[in-house]
Image (cartoon, rainbow, N blue to C red):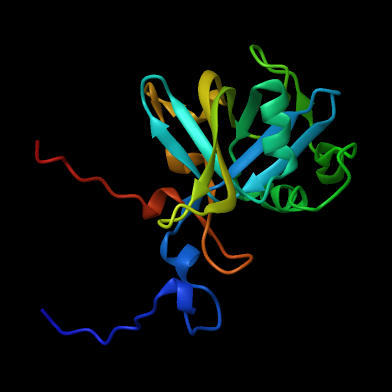
Amino acid sequence: MTEKVLHYYEPAKGHGLKHDPFNAIIAPRPIGWISSRDAKGHVNLAPYSFFNAFCYKPPIIGFSSTNWKDSAGNIQETGEFVWNLATRDLAQQMNATAAHVAQDVSEFSIAGLTAVPCKLVNVPRVGESPVAMECKLTQIIQLKGANGEKAQAWVTFGEVVAVHIDKALIKDGVYQTALARPIVRAGRSGDYFEIKPENMFEMVRPD
């Protein structure tokens, strides 16, 4: 093994770099493009860079919100939300929905997106997105550090109860991940990657 020259740091003492490398190292990350509705009927659409899938049966996805934001509040009130796939074609619209606006202002309108009614939840999905998952809230957890101190971050988990997929992305009964050209989050404040078919490879599991 070739010995590496390592940059070592302890997060509590600072990283010593121009940009915090944490979220650039844990990358790429799927984008949690979350639509929700509050108890008064106001619709919200916002992207979250801490998002992933966590369970097969039942299928559970979740996203983390730094500070208590409209999405988490809305979902706590109504118990429902929708995840929408962010693609290269929708990158600019997705970015536009990150704007901080009043709760009664719809990010769908700001980004020029179509709010399409869902089947099992009373929250609209992004009509232009090729994939959407309707979700029912399972739990919201406030994170805490190793010392037990609560962090200003909440993870919202939801069970996927319905899925919408553009049939153009299904070939021979298999969903083609890269065909949708999904975008994923990298580091800094605005770095992204695009997943392309030519960049995919397959490995056979040893078991």
Number of on-image labels: 0
Q: Is residue 147 above or below residue 110?
A: below
Residue in view at x 51 percent, y 62 percent: 186
Q: Is residue 11 left or right of residue 107?
A: left
Q: Is residue 128 visible?
A: no
Quadrant into which the C terminus falls: top left
Instruction: Pinpoint residue 201: horizontal percent, then vertical percent.
Output: 29, 49
Of residue 41 and residue 204, the one placed in the foreground of this image is: 41
Q: Residue furthest bottom?
A: 5
Q: Nearer the viewer, residue 1 or 158?
A: 158
The one nearer the camera, 174 or 103, is 103
Residue 200 location in percent, x, y?
Answer: 35, 50
The answer to whether residue 94 shows anywhere in this view is yes
> In the picture, residue 83 is in which quadrant?
top right
Q: Is residue 6 left or right of residue 105?
A: left
Which residue sits furthest top? 120
